Amino acid sequence: MNEAQRRVVVTGVGAISPLGDSPAAIHEALCEGRSGIRPIELFKTDGLPTREAGEIAWKPRDYLGNANLRPVDRTGQLVIVAAQLALEASGWTAELRGEHEVGLVLGTMFGSVHTISAFDLRALKAGPRYAKPLDFANTVINAATGQTAIWHDLRGINSTITGGATAGLQALAYAVEMIRNGRAEVLLAGGGEELCFESFCGFSRTGMLCAPQDGTSECPVPFDARRNGFRLGEGSALLVLEEAESARRRGATILAEIRGHGSAYDCSRGSDPQPATAAVERAIRQALDDAGTAADAVDAVSTAANGSVRGDRHEALGIGAVFGERSGRLPVTAVKSMLGEALGASGAFQTVAMLESMRSGVLPGIRGLEALEDGIPLALAAPQNREAELRCGLVNALGHDGNACALVVERRGEEEV
Amino acid sequence: MPQSIVVTGIGMVTPVGSGRREVWENLLAGESGIRPVESFDTSRYNVHLGAEIRDFRAAEHFEKLDPDSVGRASQLAIAAARQAVTDAGLTAETVAAERIGVAMGTTSGEPQEVEHFDDHLVAGELDRVGAEFISLYPCHVIAHHIASELGFAGLNIMIPAACAAGNYAIGYAFDALRAGRADVMLAGGADSFSRITYTGFACVGAIAPERCQPFDRNRKGMIPGEGAAVLVVERYEDAVARGARIYAEVAGYGLSCDAHHMTAAHPEGDGAARAMLEALRHGHVEPREISYISAHGTGTPTNDSLETKAVRRVFGERASSIPISSVKSMIGHTMGAASAIEGVVCTLAVAEDRVPPTINFEEPDPECDLDCVPNQSRELPVEVAMSNAYAFGGNNASVIFRKCAA
């Protein structure tokens, strides 16, 4: 890592999730072992093999008041709300945003495939002349990012990142680089993904979603020997990232520093354990190298594990390859056991949860975990919470189809930057 | 001293042909790829023209993956990527697979897969709804498929910045190389023709009924198209060390966001001007050094006059004498591929001192009083060229290419 390079700190966070709409509420729920997975109400699940997901029960108007929501679809509303919460938390008022360029980098897997499908269906049924222009504006994958910039007057860098389920961490990494390169001083970065029939139906057909078995109702259960898949979730989480010096100068509260990031691709797209595990290992090593942090300095890992039969194992072995025999003494968590797999929003949710763990000294347990699969070297993966002094955290993201990413975050007080 | 980033390979599949040589010669010759739409029935629309790629045989470009296991945009992207890699002389021995990354852009990803989803739904074939959707549809699979087909295990990212996406991807690749996160990057964009995209532009009245006439007084709109283009970019020292042919240097890039309206640009061309200025700043280029501009130039009444305003703001009086042409007049608007193809245009303009025309130009528009290289390509010294792209969501991006002093 280049010692002269600009450093990136977190000065505020906003999140809206199945477990609550603040980092503290989410952390409390995770530590209580509360699941956000419940029967889906958003759309009909007739004919589909599973019927539960991490759906958010919310009223956008609770956050957005009487503003005209018609031009913005559900994905856009989730991101707008997360942005609002993050801007409030970080002190970036409307007035300040008028004077400075605040940007937005959003990770998502689907944007809003629901809007795209609805637009197409209407044209198919009523004829193309009845297609809706307002909906067309939201059929581009960068729609939510654009809508949020308009809503909150974010005139800085505006980018949408899709990379699969790793998109949220990739968005954070992209934002870090923009700040390091001097292109931006302050960026909202994170992810947003909505639950919808189209993506849920698609995942249902892959056999990757879990269903309770053997009379148990527990699922998903990351790393567990009896795991048989994941549940989908949804939501949006955005972190306010700032160049460290300017954050200090404006008297911002500094929550943490993003120290490094790494990314690698598995050409077998998740099907071959060797390249899949190697991609996880490379991503972690790159992140540690970028952070200038030794593996020994990592206090805890927020894994991407979501209950996937293959993915959880590939990730665990990749962690094992980096940390060696220390893997058995490394505290780990898997928040998707309760939040579900929120795809593009996941990496951001995990980072938010890690920051809360650092603040509180508590790493949530892995809900429902009973027995680790043979060969998984993460002996401290457990259903109980773990109390620990957490200064340096590693956050992993893993797509089921190729990408592996990692992020190193460190707790920083203002005086340490 | 930051390292120079250079283009060493080019691949593209477009409505006027496939491969660097064929496409470039056709663009210079003013060939049009715009014809009546064939891939779906347009009888219920009041417009009927599109720039589709005809006779694309995907299997010719695949060695590893089954072409039917990927969507059309991915097929086009793989074809362009393979061409670019061959053009760059990259082999398994040249660079380690883990050090080669892929950054692509798109507007819609694989919208035909949503069409298939909906077609099954409407037909009541519920057990076929969503089959293969996850492996075919989400747009990140385009970059994934390229990397899996070619065996590249480094960075892998998709930046769906709509009609400016190719430029965002080139910018990302530039930064990744400078930061040492990769030794070679494939950067480009891809989009396939689709009824969803066509319906969208038709319903907002954006599609021209007969021709695409950027900057012309009687211009009536854009023509949706499809395509893919990929550039191989690497650090100058590495390119020289392996004896690669260098087309041009990527001097710098600029991004901006209007934060104004989802589909209409800022009325003063504010975001567009900022992106150009940021590219000039980043590339350490003076406005007077720009010899050619590849315009976003969609042919809509609004874009072309706003783009003219923005160019005037940046280049002042000199604006009227900088050749600025739009290949969209010939290949239509290829969405996420557009700025990748236009990046290739600027690369070749700089390498060969030739610039393509804006065809269908008949009557000047006082609001677009620029030299749009009407109808005939031109030979002129091109030291530095700029490629502009503006997108829904207010995403604007400009990339600057410069002759490589080698």
Image: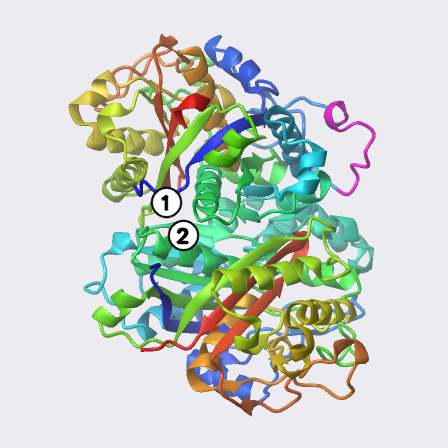
What residue lies at 57% left-to-right and 36% top-to-bottom? A192
Residue A64's label in the rendered image is none
Way the structure is coloured: rainbow
Give the residue type that dot 2 points to.
His
What residue lies at 77% left-to-right and 67% top-to-bottom? B302
Magenta region: A61-71
Give residue A40's quadrant in the image: top right
Q: Which residue is mark 2?
A: B144
Looking at the rendering, in which quadrant would you find the C terminus of chain B? bottom left
Asked if residue B339 lies left or right of residue A152, the reply is left
| Mark 1 chain | A
Magenta portion: prevailing SS class? loop
Q: Residue furthest left?
A: A325
Q: Is residue A309 above or below residue A276?
A: above
| Discs 1, 2 touching: Cβ within 8 Å | yes
B267 or A280, nearer to the observer: B267
**For residue A29: magenta?**
no
Give residue B96's quadrant in the image: bottom left
Q: What percent of the width, then of the height, locates residue B14? A: 52, 74
B334 or B111, nearer to the observer: B334
> Does residue A365 show up?
yes
B243 or A411, nearer to the observer: A411
Asked if residue A257 lies left or right of residue B293, the reply is left
Q: What percent of the width, then of the height, locates residue B221? A: 75, 72
Q: What percent of the width, then of the height, locates residue A87? A: 63, 30
Q: Which residue is mark 1?
A: A402
The CA span between labels 1 and 2 is 7 Å
Q: Is residue A156 above or below residue A305?
A: below
**For residue A63: magenta?**
yes
Q: Is residue B1 above or below residue B32?
A: above
What residue lies at 78% left-to-right and 71% top-to-bottom? B301
